[in-house]
Amino acid sequence: MASVPLIVKQISVSGLTIYDPLLHAPSLFVPTEQLEVILNSSLKGLLLNQPIRTRSKVLKTAVCTALGYPVPTSFRKTQPRFPGQNFDTYVQKANNLQIWNEEVSSSRRYVIIRVNNEDVVTRVRVVTGNIIAAYDTTGTLTHKYQAKSKHAITTSTLVVSTDTQPVTTACTQSLPPSFLSIQPLFEKLRRLEGKIIHDPGITQERNRGGVLHETIATLIGLTKWGDNGQFPDIGEQLLEIKLQTSPTIDLGLVCPNSTEPIVSIPMFRHCDVRYAVVYGMLVNSGVRLEHVVLTTGESFFSFFQMFGGLTKNSKYQIPLPSHFFD
């Protein structure tokens, strides 16, 4: 019999339910990769051939047990269904993921459970909303948040001189000494002014952004860095980076002033993230970086203005790639 992970034991003795937030117990938040391992180990072989409502209860009961939570007498209709660990569950016999009556959220985790023709669980994947959105080929998720500066950008600007209260408190209590508060972070980012970074090509915006991310990681002293699509881009510094060679800022599925918790760092909210918007100009040898605007998500819209938003659909249908469960 497989050993029970320590975090499951800690959840079990905590007395918390799946509906209790973990703001004061962040160590009980199960990281995404570990969540996938635990649920794969516990749910494989589970028979889900019951009527829909019964099947939903059977599955949620099994998930509670797997994670060490008590099984509630009745399951509430919350969004997401497992608020404490910030995830929803979906049972998939086919590769057409259907999400009803709510938008795909980058701040949420999606537990996608594959069953075979006999309705037996064979595989579990746990992914975040930004990965789900990347699989959309239908155009239903193309209406994402966009913004632009309220004024012409002529100089580097620190929009707000202090971090949000949760970040300020964490700086004195739990964050490592290498974490930079917003003012010294801004001073380091100003060193980008005048630098020319490699331009991989006019159609390679994502790769161009990756070059800037790596440049900034080196600038602030990170020895290891990798762009795997996570939010924020540099989690160690709560830093999201936007490279702008045009006025329109694509924010994706994340609204900067959102008070929802960050999937990978649930002790912080989206609005606690620091946004570095780096304005540059295309030149023959690459992109010349000219000005940096640094702000918290909380103060983002005191400097920028939104001109696009997500539209609400009653149902999203997302085709999962054939290799999704491999």
Image (cartoon, rainbow, N blue to C red):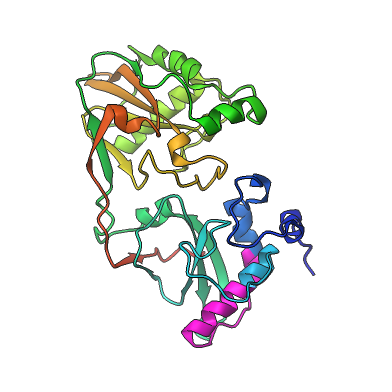
Of residue 94 and residue 259, the one placed in the foreground of this image is 259
Query: Which quadrant: the N terminus?
Result: bottom right
Q: Is residue 211 left or right of residue 245?
A: right
Q: Position of residue 254 (x, y in %)?
A: 37, 44
Q: Is residue 45 magenta?
A: yes
> Which residues make up the magenta segment?
39-61
Residue 281, quarter of picture:
top left
Q: Position of residue 122 (x, y in %)?
A: 57, 74
Task: Report the side of 298 relative to 70 (left or right).
Answer: left
Name the magenta segment's main secondary structure: helix
Q: Residue at x 50, y 36 (%)?
A: 226
Q: Is residue 125 magenta?
A: no
Residue 208 visible in rendering: no
Residue drawn at x 28%, y 23% as measured from the top left: 279
Residue 107 position (above or below residue 159) = below
Q: Is residue 141 visible?
A: yes
Residue 16 placement (x, y as % from top left) = 67, 59
**So how many labels did they put on this image?**
0
Q: Check the image and report above or below for 205 versus 264.
A: above
In terms of depth relative to the viewer, which is nearer, 31 or 310? 310
User: Which residue is drawn at the image coordinates 36% and 32% (left, top)?
Assistant: 209
Image quadrant of residue 323? bottom left
Taking depth in this image into account, of 99 and 94 the one nearest to the observer is: 99
- Return the x and y of residue 101 as percentages of the image width and height: 34, 67
**Position above or below: 87 against 223:** below
Q: Hey, which quadrant is residue 319 in on the image?
A: bottom left
User: Is 293 rendered above or below residue 115?
Assistant: above
